[in-house]
Image (tube, grey):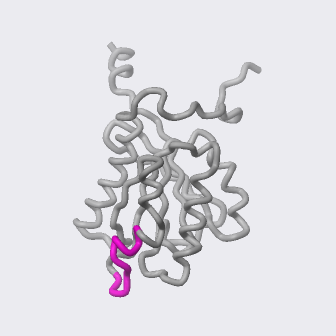
Amino acid sequence: MGNLTTAFCRRRQMRVAMFGLDAAGKTTIPTIGFNVETCKVLNAELTVWDVGTRDKLRPLWRHYYLNTQAIVFVVDSTDRDRMDEAKQILHELLTEDELTMIPIAVALNKRDLENCMSKEELENKLDLRSIQQQRACEVFLTTAYPSAEVQSEITRLMEWVAEYPANREEGSVPKQKTDRFSEEHDV
Protein backbone atom coordinates (compact mmCIF):
# COMPACT_ATOMS: atom_id res chain seq x y z
CA MET A 1 0.00 0.00 0.00
CA GLY A 2 3.01 2.28 0.48
CA ASN A 3 3.55 2.83 -3.27
CA LEU A 4 -0.12 3.69 -3.80
CA THR A 5 -0.05 6.17 -0.93
CA THR A 6 3.09 7.77 -2.28
CA ALA A 7 1.57 8.10 -5.75
CA PHE A 8 -1.53 9.88 -4.47
CA CYS A 9 0.21 12.07 -1.87
CA ARG A 10 3.11 13.25 -4.01
CA ARG A 11 3.45 17.02 -4.05
CA ARG A 12 3.97 18.89 -7.27
CA GLN A 13 7.52 20.33 -7.31
CA MET A 14 7.81 23.92 -8.48
CA ARG A 15 10.74 26.26 -9.01
CA VAL A 16 10.00 29.91 -8.23
CA ALA A 17 12.42 32.80 -8.82
CA MET A 18 12.11 35.89 -6.63
CA PHE A 19 13.49 39.14 -8.02
CA GLY A 20 13.31 42.83 -7.14
CA LEU A 21 15.66 45.70 -6.44
CA ASP A 22 17.99 45.45 -3.47
CA ALA A 23 16.33 46.64 -0.23
CA ALA A 24 12.84 45.90 -1.61
CA GLY A 25 12.24 43.53 1.29
CA LYS A 26 12.77 40.10 -0.24
CA THR A 27 14.79 39.06 2.80
CA THR A 28 15.79 40.71 6.04
CA ILE A 29 19.49 40.43 5.22
CA PRO A 30 21.34 41.49 2.06
CA THR A 31 21.54 38.65 -0.44
CA ILE A 32 24.99 38.04 -1.85
CA GLY A 33 24.39 35.50 -4.58
CA PHE A 34 21.14 33.77 -3.66
CA ASN A 35 19.06 32.27 -0.88
CA VAL A 36 16.95 29.15 -1.36
CA GLU A 37 13.92 28.18 0.70
CA THR A 38 11.49 25.34 0.21
CA CYS A 39 7.94 25.64 1.46
CA LYS A 40 4.85 23.49 1.20
CA VAL A 41 1.79 25.31 -0.05
CA LEU A 42 -1.44 23.48 -0.83
CA ASN A 43 -0.43 20.44 -2.89
CA ALA A 44 2.86 21.90 -4.08
CA GLU A 45 6.38 22.13 -2.80
CA LEU A 46 7.84 25.47 -3.87
CA THR A 47 11.58 25.94 -4.08
CA VAL A 48 11.99 29.71 -4.01
CA TRP A 49 15.25 31.15 -5.29
CA ASP A 50 15.78 34.63 -3.83
CA VAL A 51 18.28 36.02 -6.30
CA GLY A 52 20.60 38.87 -5.34
CA THR A 53 19.79 41.99 -7.31
CA ARG A 54 22.75 44.27 -6.95
CA ASP A 55 23.96 45.65 -10.29
CA LYS A 56 26.95 43.30 -10.46
CA LEU A 57 24.74 40.22 -9.94
CA ARG A 58 22.07 41.00 -12.55
CA PRO A 59 24.01 39.47 -15.48
CA LEU A 60 23.94 36.19 -13.54
CA TRP A 61 20.13 36.12 -13.35
CA ARG A 62 19.88 34.16 -16.60
CA HIS A 63 21.32 31.15 -14.79
CA TYR A 64 18.20 31.02 -12.61
CA TYR A 65 15.64 31.17 -15.45
CA LEU A 66 15.90 27.55 -16.52
CA ASN A 67 12.83 25.54 -15.46
CA THR A 68 11.37 28.44 -13.49
CA GLN A 69 7.61 27.98 -13.25
CA ALA A 70 6.66 31.25 -11.56
CA ILE A 71 8.19 34.60 -10.68
CA VAL A 72 7.69 36.71 -7.58
CA PHE A 73 8.79 40.32 -8.15
CA VAL A 74 9.10 42.37 -4.95
CA VAL A 75 8.76 46.16 -5.07
CA ASP A 76 9.44 48.64 -2.26
CA SER A 77 6.21 50.70 -2.15
CA THR A 78 8.06 53.63 -0.57
CA ASP A 79 11.00 53.91 -2.99
CA ARG A 80 9.71 56.58 -5.37
CA ASP A 81 13.23 57.40 -6.58
CA ARG A 82 13.85 53.90 -7.94
CA MET A 83 10.43 53.05 -9.37
CA ASP A 84 11.58 53.66 -12.96
CA GLU A 85 14.50 51.28 -12.37
CA ALA A 86 12.15 48.64 -10.90
CA LYS A 87 9.84 49.00 -13.92
CA GLN A 88 12.74 48.68 -16.36
CA ILE A 89 14.11 45.57 -14.65
CA LEU A 90 10.68 43.95 -14.40
CA HIS A 91 9.87 44.51 -18.07
CA GLU A 92 13.34 43.39 -19.23
CA LEU A 93 13.05 40.27 -17.10
CA LEU A 94 9.79 39.35 -18.78
CA THR A 95 11.31 39.55 -22.27
CA GLU A 96 13.67 36.65 -21.56
CA ASP A 97 12.91 33.61 -23.75
CA GLU A 98 13.09 31.15 -20.85
CA LEU A 99 10.46 33.16 -18.96
CA THR A 100 7.91 33.46 -21.76
CA MET A 101 4.37 33.13 -20.37
CA ILE A 102 5.59 32.34 -16.84
CA PRO A 103 3.05 33.70 -14.33
CA ILE A 104 4.23 36.57 -12.14
CA ALA A 105 3.14 37.60 -8.68
CA VAL A 106 4.04 41.23 -7.92
CA ALA A 107 4.46 41.91 -4.19
CA LEU A 108 3.98 45.59 -3.41
CA ASN A 109 5.98 45.50 -0.20
CA LYS A 110 6.42 47.78 2.84
CA ARG A 111 2.72 48.67 2.86
CA ASP A 112 2.93 49.40 6.59
CA LEU A 113 5.03 52.54 6.12
CA GLU A 114 3.31 55.93 6.02
CA ASN A 115 4.91 57.17 2.82
CA CYS A 116 4.01 54.15 0.67
CA MET A 117 2.39 54.68 -2.71
CA SER A 118 -1.13 53.48 -3.39
CA LYS A 119 -1.73 50.22 -5.21
CA GLU A 120 -3.11 52.13 -8.22
CA GLU A 121 -0.08 54.44 -8.35
CA LEU A 122 2.31 51.48 -8.26
CA GLU A 123 0.35 49.57 -10.90
CA ASN A 124 0.61 52.63 -13.17
CA LYS A 125 4.30 53.32 -12.46
CA LEU A 126 5.20 49.68 -13.16
CA ASP A 127 2.84 49.45 -16.15
CA LEU A 128 1.35 46.24 -14.76
CA ARG A 129 -1.71 46.38 -17.00
CA SER A 130 0.46 45.78 -20.07
CA ILE A 131 1.97 42.75 -18.34
CA GLN A 132 -1.49 41.45 -17.39
CA GLN A 133 -2.50 41.59 -21.06
CA GLN A 134 0.40 39.27 -21.95
CA ARG A 135 0.54 36.75 -19.09
CA ALA A 136 -0.95 35.83 -15.74
CA CYS A 137 0.02 38.62 -13.35
CA GLU A 138 -1.45 39.17 -9.91
CA VAL A 139 -0.70 41.99 -7.45
CA PHE A 140 -0.37 41.45 -3.69
CA LEU A 141 0.04 44.00 -0.90
CA THR A 142 2.70 42.83 1.55
CA THR A 143 4.90 44.03 4.39
CA ALA A 144 7.81 42.65 6.36
CA TYR A 145 6.14 43.15 9.75
CA PRO A 146 4.18 40.11 10.89
CA SER A 147 0.46 40.47 11.42
CA ALA A 148 -2.55 38.33 10.66
CA GLU A 149 -3.49 40.52 7.68
CA VAL A 150 0.02 40.48 6.21
CA GLN A 151 0.45 36.76 6.77
CA SER A 152 -2.86 36.21 5.01
CA GLU A 153 -1.71 38.22 1.96
CA ILE A 154 1.63 36.41 1.77
CA THR A 155 -0.23 33.10 2.07
CA ARG A 156 -2.59 34.22 -0.72
CA LEU A 157 0.43 35.10 -2.90
CA MET A 158 2.07 31.71 -2.34
CA GLU A 159 -1.22 29.86 -2.93
CA TRP A 160 -1.73 31.75 -6.20
CA VAL A 161 1.78 30.75 -7.29
CA ALA A 162 1.16 27.12 -6.27
CA GLU A 163 -2.26 26.87 -7.91
CA TYR A 164 -1.80 28.81 -11.12
CA PRO A 165 0.30 26.32 -13.14
CA ALA A 166 -2.08 23.49 -12.18
CA ASN A 167 -5.09 25.40 -13.54
CA ARG A 168 -3.46 26.43 -16.83
CA GLU A 169 -4.47 24.75 -20.07
CA GLU A 170 -1.98 22.12 -21.20
CA GLY A 171 0.29 23.43 -23.92
CA SER A 172 -0.25 27.13 -23.18
CA VAL A 173 3.33 27.57 -22.02
CA PRO A 174 6.31 26.77 -24.20
CA LYS A 175 8.27 23.73 -23.12
CA GLN A 176 11.26 24.65 -20.99
CA LYS A 177 14.78 23.67 -21.95
CA THR A 178 16.24 20.72 -20.13
CA ASP A 179 18.41 21.53 -17.13
CA ARG A 180 21.48 19.40 -17.71
CA PHE A 181 22.51 19.74 -14.07
CA SER A 182 19.30 18.32 -12.62
CA GLU A 183 18.98 15.34 -14.97
CA GLU A 184 20.01 11.91 -13.85
CA HIS A 185 22.87 10.62 -15.96
CA ASP A 186 24.22 7.11 -16.28
CA VAL A 187 27.78 6.95 -15.13
Q: Residue at x 37, y 79 (%)?
A: 117
| The residue positioned farthest toward the top in the image shown | 1
Looking at the figure, which quarter contains the N terminus? Answer: top left
**Residue 146 x/y as whole percent:** 31, 70
89 in the magenta segment = no
**Residue 145 x/y as whole percent:** 34, 74
Q: Residue at x 42, y 53 (%)?
A: 132
Q: Nearer the viewer, residue 49 or 87?
A: 87
| The residue positioned farthest toward the right in the image shown | 187
Q: Residue at x 71, y 23 (%)?
A: 185
For residue 24, above or below residue 41: below
Q: Which of the 4 image quarters holds residue 184?
A: top right
| The residue positioned farthest toward the left in the image shown | 148
Q: Is residue 100 left or right of residue 45?
A: right
For residue 74, above or below residue 186: below
Q: Which of the 4 image quarters holds residue 58?
A: bottom right
**Residue 18 x/y as whole percent:** 52, 57
Looking at the figure, which quarter contains the C terminus? Answer: top right
Q: Which of the 4 image quarters holds residue 41?
A: top left
Question: Total of numbered circles in the picture?
Answer: 0
Q: Residue at x 31, y 41 (%)?
A: 42
117 in the magenta segment = yes
**Residue 83 x/y as whole percent:** 52, 76
User: Which residue range is magenta in the image?
Assistant: 113-123
